[in-house]
Image (spheres, rainbow, N blue to C red):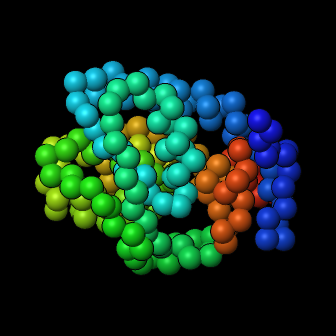
């Protein structure tokens, strides 16, 4: 299979360069999948992916989870087509599963300010799950202003705009197999 992983890519008129390679991402996902399989070995968790960004991360993560589990999705919006959050969170799709008494593993693509995650955790707690575990592909800890629970972080990153591997810029770039940052930005 040929993956779309150029070293540089132009998205919406801006040039981006590789920040995290496909190999680095896959190695970390395998580690998290193995940890989850051990931590939840006596449970039957339900993974809830936050659309659209987390779908690739969740799909790859599921391939490394070796225990019985289920999957569902919900969808929020706080960015629209912009590079920064609007500061408002909107529900676009609710979960279909009944999570009362269930071990819920919430899978997010990125946590920056923590606004969306705070909203999600408050929302899901209303359904009385047995437990809530939060996994994020990327965490911009310097940008986080809301105190939120994060149990597993694949990568901590600086406060930079990122795309690829499910993350988009005005709906483009999700199909990139690596994580990219603007070319002019230095770490």
What residue do we see at 77% from left, 35% from top? 1
Residue visible at 70% across and 53% down? 175
Image quadrant in which you'd find residue 44: top left
Q: Which is more toward the observer, 67 or 164?
A: 67
The part of the image, by quadrant, that contains residue 47 is top left
- What is the x, y in percent for residue 179? 68, 47
Q: In the rendered image, is residue 187 in sight?
A: no
Give percent across and percent down for residue 23: 69, 30
From the viewer's side, name the closer residue of 70 and 47.
Answer: 70
Residue appearing at x 67%, y 57% in the figure = 174
Query: Left or right of 16: which side holds 145?
Result: left
Q: Residue at x 80, y 56 (%)?
A: 16
- Residue 19: image location, x then y, percent: 72, 44
Would you place residue 27 above or below residue 82 in this image? above
Q: Looking at the picture, how far across and down is residue 129, in whole percent?
A: 17, 49
Number of residue marks? 0
Decide if residue 181 is on the left or right side of residue 128: right
Q: Is residue 131 above or below residue 9?
A: above
Query: Do we see residue 61 in this rendering?
Result: yes
Q: Is residue 182 left or right of residue 88?
A: right
């Amino acid at each position: 299979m040929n993956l779309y992983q150029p070293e540089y890519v132009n998205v919406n008129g801006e040039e981006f360069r590789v920040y995290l390679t496909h190999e680095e991402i896959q190695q970390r996902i395998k580690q998290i999948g193995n940890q989850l399989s051990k931590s939840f070995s006596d449970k039957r968790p339900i993974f809830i992916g936050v659309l659209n960004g987390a779908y690739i991360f969740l799909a790859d993560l599921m391939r490394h989870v070796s225990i019985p589990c289920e999957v569902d999705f919900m969808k929020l919006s706080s960015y629209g087509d912009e590079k920064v959050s609007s500061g408002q969170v909107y529900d676009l799709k609710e979960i279909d599963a009944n999570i009362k008494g269930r071990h819920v593993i919430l899978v997010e693509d990125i946590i920056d300010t923590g606004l969306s995650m705070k909203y999600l955790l408050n929302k899901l707690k209303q359904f009385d799950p047995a437990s809530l575990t939060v996994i994020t592909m990327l965490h911009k800890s310097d940008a986080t202003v809301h105190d939120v629970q994060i149990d597993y972080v694949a990568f901590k990153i600086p406060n930079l705009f990122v795309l690829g591997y499910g993350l988009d810029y005005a709906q483009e770039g999700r199909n990139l197999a690596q994580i990219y940052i603007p070319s002019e930005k230095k770490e």
